[in-house]
Structure formats: structure tokens, C-alpha cells
Image (spheres, rainbow, N blue to C red):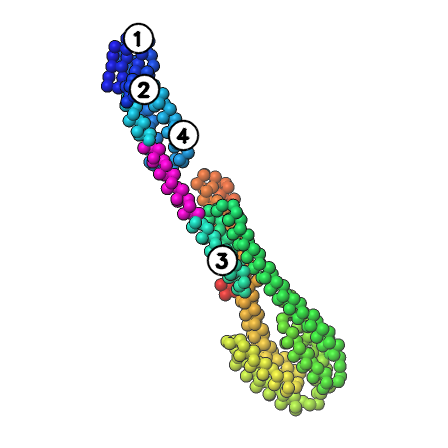
Amino acid sequence: MSSDPWGRVDETGTVYVRTADGEQVVGSWAAGSPEEALAYFERKYEGLVVEIGLLEKRVRTTDLSAKDAQAAIDHLREQVDAHHAVGDLAALRGRLDKLVETVEARREERKVQRAKQSDEARKAKEDLVAEAEQLAQSDQWRAAGERLRALVDTWKGLPRLDRKSDDELWHRFSHARSAFSKRRKAHFAQLDAQREDARRIKERLVAEAESLSGSTDWGPTAARYRDLMSEWKAAGRAQREHEDDLWNRFRGAQDVFFAARSSVFAERDAEQAENLKLKEELAEEAEKLLPIGELKAARAAFRSINERWEAIGHVPRDARPKVEGRMHTVERAIQEAEEAEWRRTNPEARARAEGLTGQLQAAVDKLGTQIEQARAQGNNSRADKLQKELEGRQALLDQALKGLQEFGG
């Protein structure tokens, strides 16, 4: 018979392990010496020691889930309780018990952490919803639209809550965005309607101006043309694609009438010479408005000059293009300043320009990343193909950025 502090082998070859509850049968050994039998079951004990040590390390140094850790502990405990090893089995049970305590403590820590993260995510989403609902009432169409898009990206980066809470908050968030989009669409639809109204009014004015262009009722017709001009200015701007054509027809009709009147009144050369002198003085006064500084003041000053100009009457035909050209230069400068101001304050056009620029920039950035990946993988053929596509997109981006400068940003 052979034995050690934790086990023995009797004369029949039965192997025992010593425990606090007395000896327990480990197994039987028929081949080899009793020493070999003990050594075999001691190695099985050392194997359990190694497995428990590895599990302790995994629990301590990795994010092993509590469920998986407990399953591993139960598996090892079954092996220890089966008494198929010789050694201090009580010590192994103690280590497994401590592991259970550690896993449970870790489980509670994670539970608390998850609760904290959920509370933080809920608070963050509630803040996003509150801001979105406030932005839904904004008239700052470009800035509010950009901020709402940023809020969506922020929302996507937050953890999900329980389904009911998440769905309720998302419904409010989505409703706020929809309300803003509906208001913005209505706003720009109203602007379009106003421009369409201006177009219809100006088409009527053009039709009347053209019908009057052959009139020889000089005084009343000239007065009516002045009234038509006042109505034209009061109508506001039509769509850009119609405005210039309508204006050219309107001015052309007036030109026909006033040219005819000038030919009839050729005998008034002396008076027209004086008119020329007065208009040259007004042209000089108008030219002092250049370059256009404060638009509102320049517009008012030019209106005053133009009213006095209209009141003067005609000048000799050969002098007319030059002196009127001087006034037209100032008028065009004011119109260009108005056009620039309109473009600068047009949120719809700016939003489209900025949206296009953003899309092109994203495409350029993506292609750059793909080229780097292709180079890194040694796929130079694909990289060269992508490089050509990148050059094309970059050219479009440069053009879009140049157009965006017209809006002052």
C-alpha cells in the first residue's frame, strides 16, 4: 500500500482521497505500481489547479460575461465534486467559491454601470428632443436645418433605451423635424408665389407699355409710362429667368414711344440742350454714388435723382445714349448690389449650394480613403482608377466652393 498527505492506494488497487468528510474513492488502479496510481491522480489534481487558475485570470483581466463565467465555475465544481483527483479538493472548492463572489460582484457592477449608461442616454436623448422641438419653431432656415441634421447624427451615436421609451422619444424627435421641414417648405413656397405674382403683374405692365408705344398722345402717354414704372418697382422681383426679359421689353416699349416723341419735338432743340445739361448734372450726381456702399441710402438717392431725371424731359437724340448710359451704369450697379444682397440672404439657394459642397467634400474624402486602402493592399490599378475619379470630383468641389463664395461663406 502507498500513500501521501492527500491520498492512498490500498492493496486492492483502490485509490482514495482524504477530505474533511473522510476518505472518498477516487478510482481503481490495476496496471503499474501504487506510486504510479497516486502520481496519475495527482496530475489530474494539478490539471484542475491550472484550469481554475486560468479561469481566475480570465475573470480578472477580460470582459468574460457573468453567464459564461458561472458556467465555467459549475463545470469545474462538478469535476472537483466527482473526487477523481488526489489533492486539497477543499482548497479548490474555496477558490471556486471566491470566484463565484467575484463574478457576482462584477455582475452587480455591470448592472449599475448599465443603469448609469441608460440614464445618461435617456437624459441625452431628452435634451436632443427638447432642442429639436425648439428648433422646429425657428425661422433661421439654414442654421436650424444644419443643427437638426447634426442632432440626428448625435442621436445615432447614442445607445438604445428600452423599446417603449426609445420609440416615444424618437417619435417626438421625428415630429419636430417634420414640423420644421413643413414650415420651411411653406415659407419658400410663399416666396415662389410672390415672385410668380410679380411676374404676372409685370407681364401685364409690359403688355400695356407695348400697346402704348405707338401713341402720339404725348403728354398723357408719358405720364402713364411714369405710372407704369412706379407700378413696376412696386411689384417686386419676378423669378430671375423672367426678370431681365420682361425688363428689356418694358424699357424697349418706352424707348419706342419716347423716340417717336423726340422726333416730333425736334424743333425744341434749345430746350433739349438745356435738358441735356441738367441730365448731365444729374448723371454726375448719380455717379458720386459709386461704388455702392450703403444699399438702402444709395437706392433712395438714385430714386430721387431718377425722379428729377424723368421730370426733365428728353435730350438731343445723339447725346441721349451717352448721358443715359452714365445713369444706366449707376442703375446697373444698384441692381447688381440688390441681386448680390438677395443672393446673400436667400437661405434656400445657399442651403442648396452648401448641401452640394458637403456632398462633394464627403465624396472626395471617401475616395481619398479608398485610394490609401488600395495602395496599402498593393492594388495600384484600382488606386489609379480611383485617383482619376478623385480628380474629377475635386474639380467639381472647387467649382462648388467658388459658387458658395457668392453667398459670403
Residue range highlighted in magenta: 98-118
**Kind of residue at badge 1:** Thr
Q: Secondary structure at mark 2?
A: loop
Q: How many marks?
A: 4
Marked residue nearer the N-terminal end (4 or 1): 1
Marked residue nearer the N-terminal end (1 or 2): 1
Taking the magenta stretch, the answer to whether it contains residue 107 is yes
CB of mark 2 within 8 Å of CB of mark 4? no
Instruction: Name the mark on residue 12.
Output: 1
Q: Which residue is mark 2?
A: 85
Q: Position of residue 4 (x, y in %)?
A: 24, 17
**Kind of residue at badge 4:** Ala
Near mark 3 (Cα within 10 A), the count class, few <14, some 14-19 or many ≥20, is some
Give the alpha-carbon distance from disc 3 to disc 4, as whole Å. 45 Å
Q: Secondary structure at mark 3?
A: helix
Marked residue nearer the N-terminal end (2 or 4): 4
Reply above or below: 63 against 17: below
Near mark 1 (Cα within 10 A), the count class, few <14, some 14-19 or many ≥20, is few
**Kind of residue at badge 3:** Ala
